[in-house]
Image (tube, grey):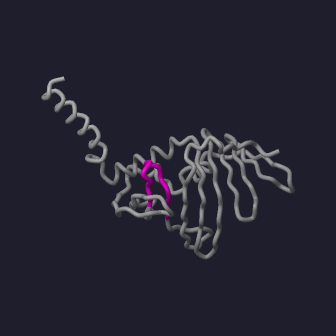
Amino acid sequence: MKASMRGIVLAACFAAWLAPTAWAGPREDVNAAIDQFLAARSFHADILITGAVTQRRRLEFVAPGRYRMRGEDAAEQVVIGDVLFVAVDGKPSATAITDDTLLQWRDPVRLAQNAADMTVTALGEETLGEQPARKFRIDHPPPQAGMVTLWIGTDGYPLQVASDGELQGQAVTTTIRYSRYNDPAIRIDPPR
């Protein structure tokens, strides 16, 4: 290969390598993380709600529509498709549910729903635990007005999201820490 052709090929490869970060802005970075999150085959989430009350929950998801949520009271809820299973006196009870119930578990702060109208500000880099992350502030206009803080890991997936809101008429802060994206060991079966 001639030197001039090699230079053109190297320049093209270098430009392609730089392009995703050279052209992306905060909004594009957040939209890409939302898209990647919604396309995940599975994940684990630790949810902490603080304020007038403190609640801890764990949520696991396996695509396309399997969820398991456990609260501090050890109650377990399992969703398979559009059926919610809850153990009552040690026996599973099944109830039909709507898509609205599932949406709050899959996208609890409605990032995807409000992506078109959000304003995104990059807040720099931060470490969560031992994981480096980029931090973003997301503001939503009315009627979904509110502010969300999102940390995105080096793999492009959300690591943590924090938002202020209300729970039963009380001001609360909800922090969700995500892990185990696309982990084939996460399995969710109907309770027996």
- Magenta stretch, main secondary structure, is strand
- Taking the spot 68% from the left edge, 50% from the top edge, the residue there is 68
Magenta span of residues: 150-162
x, y (%) of residue 5?
A: 16, 27
* Residue pictured at 27% horizontal, 42% vertical: 19
The quadrant of the picture occupied by the N terminus is: top left
Q: Residue at x 50, y 68 (%)?
A: 164
Residue 144 or residue 178, whichever sits in front: 178
Q: Is residue 153 magenta?
A: yes
Q: Is residue 139 visible?
A: no
Q: Is residue 5 visible?
A: yes
Query: Residue 29 location, x and y as percent?
Result: 37, 50
Furthest-top residue in view?
Answer: 1
For the image, the number of numbered tags is 0
In the rendered image, residue 182 lying in the magenta stretch gets the answer no
Quarter that holds the C terminus:
top right
| Residue in front for this viewpoint, 67 or 129 | 129
Can you give x and y, in whole percent of width and height, for residue 10 in the image? 22, 34
Relative to residue 166, is residue 158 drawn left or right? left
Left or right relative to 99: residue 161? left
